[in-house]
Image: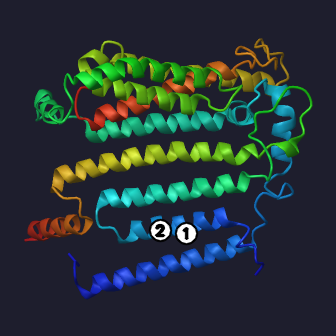
Amino acid sequence: MNNYMVTNLPEVAAIVLFGIGFSNLLLARNLIKKIIGLNVMDTAIYLFLAAKGYVDDAAAPIVSAGTVDPDLYVNPVPSGLVLTGIVVSVSVTAVLLALTVRLYEEFNTLDIDEIVHQLRRKDREAMR
Amino acid sequence: MFKGTRIQTLYNILSIAFTMLLIGILLYTVSEMPVMGDPLNPANNEVAVHYLTNGARETGARNAVTAMILDYRAFDTLGELCVLFVSACSVYILLRVDAGKKEEEVEAIDRRYEPRNDVILNKAFLFLVPAVFLFGTYITLTGHLSPGGGFSGGAIIGAGLLLYLNAFGLEKTERFMHRIRYRRLNCGALGFYFLAKGYSFFVGANDIKSVIPITNRGNILSAGLIMPLNVCVAIVVATTVYAVYLMFRKGGFNI
């Protein structure tokens, strides 16, 4: 095990943030809070990718005309990947929130345990 | 149903333990990763070097990220736009007003919480909204020369549309942004993107001389297809933001 944990602080922060979001996803019973947890996980991924593309003492990748020295600019590839991630995250969040609205209209609650409880009761009544 | 029971406690403990295990494994991996910010990292390989050194000459875009997402990997961006379109469609399918309820009734419920004829809001947004639209257009049109591009510009224009809607109400917004225009703008932008980029990739792969000139003079019309494609991206993003907001607002927008 190398001791790069200290030099890779943004990556460490991204992992911790990912864990916070993931535990929120597992533990929160409110559906909106679950979606917030998923978004925290997304943000952790953006931070990780941005940290991967960073180069010390380098500028943003807006190159000037003529010959270009690539050592002067940060890596543009992770920036593009973050853009893709943001778009997908926004779309998934919109669909999840729409599903949550429908669930709330149906069961009048956002508590996932309560929804499962009501569904089981309906099943039992249908069996009878 | 397990609230306060032993199963709930066990589930909580197990999920915390699992998360800790996951964080531990990932942190171990991070500690084995190369030092951040080193130019010799494996992430800064020949792909990034090629984009930086040849991007301005081959695509005409000064912004290497724009050159990448709208030229080298333009079909990836088309996929993203389709994801946005499909998500707007799914939200519409999930949230459209039920046939049983009257649309006016549903609207009345949500309208109750909206500001109406607020003098401060109206006067402030009268000055703010044009500035927001102008800024979004600027970001979109100079996406190949400066930081920005279709996604950020489209998000700003979409936010401006939402501001306008909240300040002046749906009737005034629908004068220039109604559902037929939404459909035409969105499908037109997606279709133009597909056709233009399909042509560009076809002539590029077959070594045919393209009719679209590419220079890197650094002015607004210099980078061939990138500026029109940025406009397409901005249109799709702005209309999707607006449409999704209207659908969550309930009613007033049936495609």
Residue A119, located in which quarter of the rendered image? Answer: bottom left
Q: Residue at x 14, y 34 (%)?
A: B112
Q: Which residue is mark 1?
A: A16
Residue furthest to the right: A67
Disc 2: which chain?
Answer: A
Respond whether the residues carrying marks 2 and 1 are from the same subunit: yes
Q: Is residue A95 above or below residue B59?
A: below
Expressed as whole percent of the image width and height from the top left, the position of residue B157 reads 47, 25
B199 w.r.t. A126: above or below? above
Give the residue drawn at x 46%, y 64%.
Answer: A21
Rendering coords of residue B164 (x, y %): 34, 23
Quadrant occupied by the N terminus of chain B? bottom left
Residue kind at label 1, given as amino acid type: Val
Q: CA distance from mark 2 to mark 1?
A: 6 Å
Residue B183 in sight here: no
Q: Kindly indicate the quadrant of the structure image that contains residue A65.
A: top right
Residues marked 2 and 1 touching at CB (< 8 Å): yes
Q: Which residue is mark 2?
A: A20
For the C terminus of chain B, the quadrant is top left
Depth check, front residue: A10 or B244? A10
Q: Is residue A33 visible?
A: yes
Secondary element type, mark 2: helix
